Image (cartoon, grey):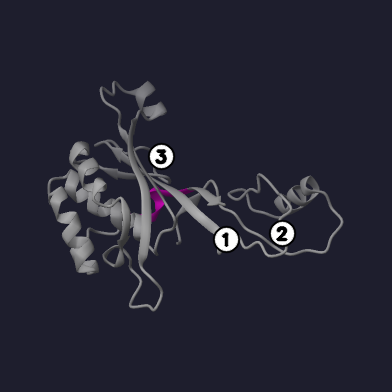
Amino acid sequence: DAGVHALGQVANFHADIRMSEQEIMNYVNSYLPEDIAVISVKEASERFHSRLNATGKTYCYLLVQSGIPHVFERRFAHRIEERLDVEAMEKAAGYLLGTHDFAAFTSTKKSKKSTVRTIDEITFTREYSSVMHIMTEVQEPDLLRITYSGDGFLYHMVRILTGTLLEVGMQLRSPEEIPEILKSKNREMAGPLVPAKGLTLMEVRYS
């Protein structure tokens, strides 16, 4: 997904080489651009596949609530000026927990692949932007971090979920509409696709 960031991306490759894990990491990093870094290398079984063997993922979407552009967060957060009803957003998120068909929350056209996924947790965390808090008299936390954990996510799913929750927070729709959106399996019933820059893959889990 172009424009999305990753702190916990995992990849695998097969190689017949005599190098230590540290040597491999240093070697690969020497060829990577400055915005990509390998932070750990571990030997895995021959049959391990970083994508197919994943049992869970955690994503974070970062929002800036401010009328003033945030210079340092601009590449990693989506700025909105509206005040949000976070309590309503939390209520709406409750309807998304569990196992559902999330066809309404993906940009993928009709596919034979299952659109059923399980979301284990959605949390909302208010934070202060460090620079803006120092330089201005910010009275309330100006960052909202929405964290999603589940067994896997469809194409654009987290960004559409966030767009829908934002509409709830802006009182453009009620939390009680979420079950109907899920039931509809209709992309047009859900909220907008928010910008990619606010999304970060935090962790990929394996059994």
Dot 1: element: loop
Is residue 89 depicted above or below 151 in this figure? Answer: above
- Residue drawn at x 84%, y 60% is 17
Q: Between residues 54 and 27, which one lies in front from this camera angle?
A: 54
Q: Distance between the residues labelled 3 and 1?
A: 33 Å
Q: Between residues 1 and 183, which one lies in front from this camera angle?
A: 183
Q: What is the x, y in percent for residue 159? A: 34, 55
Q: What is the x, y in percent for residue 193? A: 29, 59
Dot 2: element: loop
Is residue 19 depicted above or below 189 in this figure? Answer: above
Q: Which amino acid does label 3 sit on?
A: Glu
Tag 1: Cα neighbours inside 10 Å, few (<14), some, or many (≥20)?
Answer: few
Left or right of 122 in this view: 202:
right
Tag 2: Cα neighbours inside 10 Å, few (<14), some, or many (≥20)?
Answer: few
Foreground: disc 3 or disc 2? 2
Q: Which mark is residue 45?
A: 2
Q: Distance between the residues labelled 1 and 2?
A: 12 Å
- Residue drawn at x 33%, y 68% is 107
Q: Residue 53 carries which label?
A: 1
Q: Name the residue under label 3.
A: 73
For marks 1 and 2, the one nearer the N-term is: 2
Q: Between residues 60 and 197, which one lies in front from this camera angle?
A: 60
Q: Distance between the residues labelled 3 and 2?
A: 39 Å
Q: What is the x, y in percent for residue 170? A: 16, 45
- Residue drawn at x 33%, y 78% is 110
Which range of residues does the magenta coloring cover? 195-201
Please state the total of marks drawn on the protein image. Answer: 3
Q: Which amino acid does label 2 sit on?
A: Ser
Dot 3: element: loop
- Residue drawn at x 62%, y 48% is 34
Check residue 85 for magenta coloring. Answer: no
